[in-house]
Image: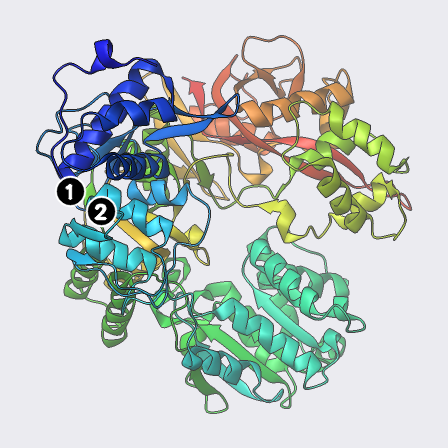
Amino acid sequence: MNFESEFGYGLRVPSGSGPRARRAIADLVRRVVSARRGVSRIALLEWIQQFIEGPNRSEASALVESVIDVLCEIKDIGFGKTLGEPVLVALPVRRIALPDGKVIAIGDHRIENGAGSEHLVPEVDQTATETLIDFLDSFEGTAVLIGAPALSPKGRWTGDGAMASALRRALTLSGVFDPVTLEWSTSEVNAAFMNDWFGLGDNVSSTKTTSASDTSQLRVAKAAAGSRMVVEAGPGAGKTHAACERVIALVQDEGLAPSRVLLLSFTRVAVAELIARIAKRLQDVPNVAALQIRTFDSFAARMLSASNSTSPGGYDAAIQAAARLLRSDDPLVADAIGQLEHVIIDEAQDLVGDRKELCEALVSLLDSSCGITVFGDFAQSIYGYQQREKSGSTFLTEIVQRDDFISDRLESDHRTKTLALREMFRVVRENLRDDQGGSREGYFNVREQIKAAALENEITRFAAHSSTTRGLILTRSRRGLFTAAEDMRSAGRRFRLRLPDRPLRIEPWIGAILGAHPASESISRDAFGVMHEMLFPAAVRDVDESWEILLDLDGSGRDSIVVGRVADGLNEPPLELLSDHEGNAGPLLSTIHAIKGREDQRVMLLLTKAPHGETVDWGEEARALYVGATRASTELRTGWISPVKFYTTGKPERYWAARADHRLIEIGLEPDLVDWLEFLHSGHVINEAETIARIWQASIKEPKVVAIPDSEGRLILRFEGEEGYAIGVLSPDFAEMLQSIRQVAPDAAPPELISGISVVGATTVVVPGHAGELPGLVLAPLLGGFARIPR
């Protein structure tokens, strides 16, 4: 292949094998590959050799080969084979932001001008498409190189064995790197980042647990069954692991009957995770399913049901009723609680108001021999705003003062992977401990310490920032969250959204496939395979994985499933089938309060103007920032946001905003749609199977829908621009709230069109059967965004 006439005029590669020669060779390779789109590697190698001064042919060949290998390794060019011959191909351009702020380009960027440059890849003055973290994460394999020496800005590899390919890539992009001598030169910021990211030198990754960590978790887990203790568990301290080990030790080592162990936590997702972990470890223990692992709300409901008390409706009312029941001196209640031999209470710092009173009533009713383990963290107490009386008292602050409780602490940080974050976790925590009453000065100290640990600060255009391709984006308030979501939508970015008061989200493929089938229908593996294949768009889980899940839910041990038994199994769905957010892709947006218990390698913490006024709880504001910042294990940034104005209304509370010619009202809360049976009875379901198919397709495409009143004034959800299938009916409670926002009487004519409603997914729903009959399954849409209501 002849390149001479097209590319060869005036070319010369500097003598030697140093960085300038390597850059010149790289420019030649990129020039030819870019122009031809694909080229023989052998032919290109032979052609480039003639422009190299000095070394003999074999040395020149080795030099060119090494440069091509590096370009392929960093995905600057692609490679493959055509008819058995190795070829090089052009790849799309990518612009990568380095930790020190520079942006470099790889791929088909057509930038040369490398004469005299020692950097293999060009620096560009353009917006990055991704960060170095994104680039490194695109390759398989671990990023932790524990035990390898730390990098200085200039140096040579002295580690045992070959340098890891991930580190070679990072050094090539971050500065000047010779893959033969393994020498490099980079900025101090880039070197520090690589030490943190790869766990080099003294910055050992926290994934390597220490003996102290094992000791503290073991001490808590193995404490005597009758002991009563308060365990301080900071972010990343391994609280969930310790709680699981505590239950396992109580059953396996202490011989407690599973039914006599009660563990209470806040969320259904947290409870599902605890159940899954413990059940796996205790799978050979008889009656392990009798373990009482519940949310506080579920525990209250069970108490009321067991005592034949009428549930007053609503979570808070049920909690209040259950607390009164525990204090009622009812002998049956006292006997039931007296059977417990150990109670574990999670997140004690967030137990305020009614839930605090519930737990206090529970503890007072326990037998004196019953052990109690309370997990909490003073530094993560951020629910004081929910207290009716602003006393600052939580279940944790009360219980820790009791003489019959001892105190312990989980001592290690199992989360952070960088020295900067590890130090911030520790220093801010100690500052909060010293200033538990809270002060304005303490708040600003915490804020500055968090910013000091961040890679970047006060990013104003966070929605366009290359780091927000994944990870968590956190706000202090729901106003900020909705503002951030709108910024992401305006930038054309996909994202997921975590909001409280949303319906339970069970993987929708189950309802999409089994919905509208009779509850008594038995389905074989072959029949299910056909049903799975016919689903369009296709489910994420393959047919074999899906079938195994359904067999587990059915629980009969047979080689076929019954729809009703699967539905019954979903009354308490396993963790892997649950989702706590809207949307299918992109970073997860959440308030700090809603994200507790979660972590991610990457966090964007959106700051606002500092609070002001005489009523500010500076301690809680500081702790909220700490909770948000400590979700990050590797990469923390701070952004800047100015939340737009919203009003609130109703219970559960929802946001709305006034505009010149319309109102906007938050939609998608749990009571916003009527149930499936009421939807069927509305007369707007033409074909149940077809309606479910439409909902499934909408859950993937996430379209807009509108609400249009029918002849009876019900608000029917339909796709924009379609007169056909309805996919749901807005509830009377939502319709009444809508009328109050419009400032008209509840029985006034509804608006002719409500627009702007987004379908943000779907959930499998269990439909109760008639007396003595199995439940059925359907698929319901999940709504989100703000409905637009004309004035």
Q: Position of residue 230 (x, y in %)?
A: 47, 81
Q: Position of residue 656 (x, y in %)?
A: 39, 32
Q: Nearer the viewer, residue 228 or 750?
A: 228
Label 1 environment density (alpha carbons within 10 Å; few <14, some 14–19, many ≥20): few
240 lies left or right of 101: right
- For the N terminus, the quadrant is top left
763 lies left or right of 548: left
Q: Position of residue 727 (x, y in %)?
A: 65, 22
Placement of 489 over or under 472, stated as above or below: above
Q: Quadrant of residue 294?
A: bottom right
Q: Quadrant of residue 387?
A: bottom left
Give the residue drawn at x 27%, y 47%: 179
Residue 18's label in the rendered image is: 1
Q: Quadrant of residue 433?
A: bottom left
Give the residue drawn at x 46%, y 59%: 597
Label 2 environment density (alpha carbons within 10 Å; few <14, some 14–19, many ≥20): many
Q: Amino acid at mark 1?
A: Gly
Residue at disc 2, secondary structure: strand
Q: Amino acid at mark 2?
A: Asp
Residue at disc 1, secondary structure: loop
Residue 178's label in the rendered image is: 2
Residue lying farthest front?
56
Placement of 753 over or under 393, stated as above or below: above
Q: Is residue 612 visible?
A: no
- For the C terminus, the quadrant is top left
Q: Nearer the viewer, residue 773 or 359?
A: 773
Q: Is residue 418 visible?
A: yes
Could you tell me how far apart the alpha carbons at marks 2 and 1 are, in whole angstroms? 8 Å
Which mark is first along the chain, 1 or 2?
Answer: 1
